[in-house]
Amino acid sequence: MASAAARGTLAQALSKMQSPDKDYRYMACSDLLREVTRESFDKFPSRETEESAMDAVLKAVFDQAADVAGLAMKCAAAIARRGETTTAERTTRALCASVGEKKDAAKRDAACMCLKTIVREIGGFEGGAREGVLGTCAPALATHVATAARAGATADEMNVAAEAVDVLHVMMTVLSEMPHARLSEEHSAKLQETLLKHLEHGKSGTRKRAAQCLALLATFMKDDMLNQTVNMVMEVLKDKVAAKKGKSDLHTFVLGATARALGYRFGEYVNEVMPLLLRVCESSTDEYDEEVIVNIEGALQAIDNVVSSCPANVQGDEGTAARFACALKYISYDPNFDDDETEDMDTYEDEDEDVYSDDDEYNDDDDESWKVRRAAAKMLSALVGVASEPTLSEHYDDVMSKLLARTKDREPSVQLDVFSVIGDIVRVGAKFREHDPESKMSAKLRETTTDVIRIIIRESASKSPKTQVAAFALLSSLASVFPSILSDISDAEIRSSLMNIVQRCVGDKACGSSARIEALAFVCSVCKPNNLEILEPYVRDLLPQIFAACTDKYYKLVTEALRACAAVVSVLRREDTGAVSAENASQIKSLLDAVLTKLDASDEDQDVKEAAIHASAVILATLNDHINTQDQSRALGLLLERSRNETTRLPAVRAFAMIAGSSRPMDLSAVAAAMTSELTTFLRKANKSLRESALAALTALISSHRAALQDPDVVPIVVEASTLLSEEDLHLATLSVGLLTTIVAAASVFPKATQETAKSTMPLALKLTRSPLVQRQTLKSLQELYKNLILAGVVNFESLFEALSDTKDIQSVDSQFVAHSLAKCVAAACVAAAAIKQTMSTLLAKLQGVSGIEAVYTLLCIGEIGRLTDLSADKELETILFSAFDSYGDEVKGASALTLGRVAVGNRAKYLPLIVSKLESDSMEHQYSLLQALREVIVVGNLTEDEASKVLTILYGTASSEEEGVRNVVAECLGRLAASNPSKLIQDVHKRFAVSASPLEKATLISAIKFAVLASEKGELTKIRSELRLPEFMGAISDEDVNVRTSVIKTLTAVIHRESTLITPLLSDVLPKLLEQTAIATELVRVIDLGAFKHTVDDGLECRKSAFECVNTILDSCGGLVNARDVVVALASGLGDHYDIKMLAHAALRKLSAGVAPNSADAVLANLDAFCEPLVKTFTARVKSDAVQQEIDRNNDLLRSALRLVYSINEHAGSASVASWKTFNEESVVGGKENIAEMYARIEKENE
């Protein structure tokens, strides 16, 4: 209830609104609006007050004073929102009646404006008030529109209908963006009927608006009404096509706009709509006629909208060729000109042959055929954007030749669109090239690069600034896709012309900033190794133009010019020669001055500052031997000053890291101490990037410029860097260990700092070594640190060995990881201290009386020492290791196997034959352990041909073992061995696979290919593509045996993770077969009768789980190549499967909902009906009453995963139009169990 003060304010405002003074009325409206919109305002004191307020406001809506009327309209919307439902209904009824005012146009306009204001605010109305407003407004406005559709309608009725359509358009626009607000089915049907009639009989100026309303109305039509609407529009279009007369643009517009509004829902009409739209184009004559132009333009725009909105429905269908042909035909539609000669590619270089030159006498001011050409260009852009690589490659020659010819179009807007389409082709080609470097599309694009360059050269002299920008933007895009573009141009004259126009554009202010920026971006892109020799002759003339650009007032241009300054350094001093020619050396002084001028300026934009810092660092790091001492000192001083400024601190630190780490060291003695002090303080900052860069800079400084530093300068570094040795951030810890190792390695220069490591570093390093999270690079860094500490004499080996050997605090869960880390560090320190003999004696003696983690640790220490040195002199070692195979506990057996393998690495000549002979014996007792040992030897590699042959014989002999663990180790051994000589060994694997009759052996051989890929260097994989024989191995995904299929899927996942380009050419064939494996195979489900109860075993579970994991990997690595519809349909089955599969299905569907694949969000929305039932079961499933905490946590994780999927889908407005999904949300999510609603609320809050 309103307070006394509020009641007084309302009464006073209502009283003033009756005043004859317009200022009083304005202030009264303002006071009323402020009072009603207050957050604390609940409702009016009484019903009478509310009605009185609305009556007064409605009167003010028609006030003669425009400012009073405008404020009154806002008041009306506010009162309708805060008041009773009946008040809102009464208001809209009164306003709709005023809209029908035929004689008083001013009153009609005011009523329309007020209705629009109310409708725009309808999202904030309560449900009842909102439905009341819509239920009153829609039929009344429909009636007004209908009066103009009858025969003999008067001009006043036409005007009323026009105003009503305008209000309806606002209403439809607002409702299309509000999933929770909808018109009733009855009102939708009435509006549909009325608007369709208005398309034929309404006022010409409002028909387009009515068509837009009809398209927006389709977003919340039921399927039957939508079918009726689309069919009615299509029938009218068919009649017009058959008659070959009359304008059809409105009806084609309705189809296109409806497709754009509906997205995936329009897909089912594509097969009927597309041929009809093409017929509209074909039915038009080739002679110039305004009606023909309007019809063709409308049809082309509609096709553009349908293609863009329903890409999955138009990809690869039979009409693709017809659509490309249509676009290519009309992109040159110009009935007033015979442009055949423009198709001749030989005319590109001859400006005198331009058929659209200024000498033409034809005046084309009234020629609107350009609209058709522009619509065709946009349609072609849409077709290119959704086409698959095979489709685009098939049509590439025709499309590109036509586009290159049309770059001479006489209409500038068409010319820009043509350049835009060529740019789209370049970007699509880059996408295909990213997935497959040998793609056919990429090769075709490279072949036509020279032709495109000719066009760019010609249009760079265009009188239109926009055309110049488009030409240089295209040039920049080409260079980003093909950095070796200059070397690809075989014609030296064209190359020279290209560099001349770039040079002219960079330095000519008349070209405009945008074109100059694109030209500079091109320079940055082509300063790559393949082009350096070609670029060098042009540098002398290009650099002055870049320097001039650095002085420009536009910060974006200056930034790009500074980046070009940094890029051109690689041309001045080429990496292949390392020398700087005398001619290039003469430019270095000017180059540095241009950069330092911007570096010294304090009032520059942040982007300019960062670019200047980077450019100065590149110059100093690369060309310092050609820079005098004074300039070096100036540059270093400015960089030091920038490091003290918070906004430029990070780029300055990175600059110091680059300079200090340069392969051409410069004298930093003048700034080294100050720089070290600044960098040390940065190690305490919260900014992680700053700390990382500071560590890198300090490491480079101490490594390469230690003579410029004093011992006291380095001690604080040890103290600060030691504090970063924590498992909380292992990357920082690794960098810190590397820095400390560098300091210790220079112990003779920094003795105090080195001694400080014993106090500050050692305790934290030992603690870090015991972390189960420490792996790979961090562990290698720690090994180097311990090694250098021993060599520097900071710590003695005995005390370090004792500290590392303390295993009592190691938890059993983490024991294996920690024991491996400790053993590697002990081995590194032992070898550095040359204490191998006594250490081995200690370890072997200790091994006799320990068990568990102590035994594991001791064995691993022996293995790591054996890996680094030859232990064959120890006669007892062999016996001890083999006896450990009989120990109790798998951990000890595994450690003994690893130890044997690592000892064999140290002396392969002795131990490898021993391992092979043991495997060849009849006894299979220790087969698994021996194979593990063999794997350690193979991992190191370098086996001779004879050794490899013997090992292969053993591996092939055990490839069909019944033991899964044995097969896994055999597969890894085979794969790693094959990776060492893929041309021979992978072929052997393939031959054996082709003739094998054992499913287990085939599964092992396929897994071997997985390990071969994982063991190969990433850059080398594309070189051995043919040797991998992936098509043959992937073909086994349809094998009868589930183990074979599982192996294929796991191999597929691993290959995509490692190098997705190996799989992308096969994806179209493999993906459908992969999706088949996501379904439950009933023949693999069996029930075991255990008497008192029955147990169900699903032998296909592992295969399905692998399939879902593989789908997730494909979406992450090459989602742009998948058919989203097929993937979503397959994933839906996983929502009701096993726990692990549900989690994977949720993750994959979230990615698809986020648009990871083309049209994937629409595909998810199209299948929401299939999601509801399994998700309801997930939410309503009960946890057992005696469930342990782990089971409860797993269930909560599953619920959160499912709710995140629901949230990602609900983010799409279209989800609310699916009735079953809306009901599911209301009953099972928001209105479901209390814990579900709370979880969902938290997820919503997390994503705010």
Image (cartoon, rainbow, N blue to C red):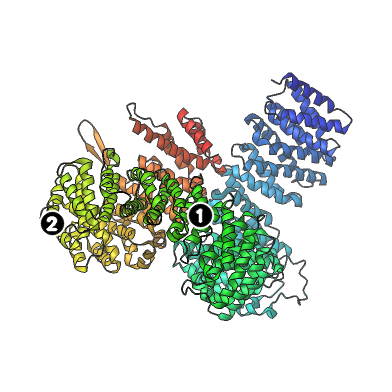
- Which is nearer the eye, 592 or 306? 592
Residue reaching furthest top?
A: 4
Residue drawn 70% across the image and 38% down it: 119
Q: Looking at the image, is mark 2 or mark 1 nearer the viewer? A: 1
The picture places residue 572, in percent across and down from the top left corner, at 54, 72
Residue at 28 percent across and 53 percent down: it is 828
Q: Is residue 175 left or right of residue 713?
A: right
Q: Which residue is depicted at the point 47% across and 28% down?
A: 1234
| Residue 174 falls in image quadrant | top right
**Percent x, y for residue 1243?**
50, 37
Quadrant location, the C terminus:
top right
Q: Are marks 2 and 1 in contact (CB under 8 Å)?
A: no
Of residues 1228 and 1013, the one nearer the viewer is: 1013
Left or right, residue 728 beside residue 180: left
Label 2 crowd bin: few (<14), some (14–19), many (20+), radius 10 Å: some
Instruction: Please tell me how crowded label 1 is: few (under 14), some (14-19), or many (20+) other residues with Cα within 10 Å.
Output: some
Q: Is residue 536 above or below residue 233?
A: below
Closer to the chain start, of discs 2 and 1, is: 1
Q: Residue 13: percent from the left, percent from the top?
A: 80, 26
- What residue type is disc 2 on? Lys
Please, which residue is most extreme toward the left here?
A: 922
| Residue 161 visible within the image | yes
Q: Secondary structure at mark 1?
A: helix
Compared to residue 616, the image places residue 818 above or below, namely above
Query: Which image quarter holds the N terminus?
Result: top right
Residue type of the residue flagged with mark 1: Ala
Taking the image as drawn, is residue 1001 in sight?
Answer: no
Count of labels in the image: 2
Q: Which residue is mark 2?
A: 918
For the residue pair 437 and 1081, the one nearer the viewer reads as 437
Numbered circle sitting on residue 673: 1
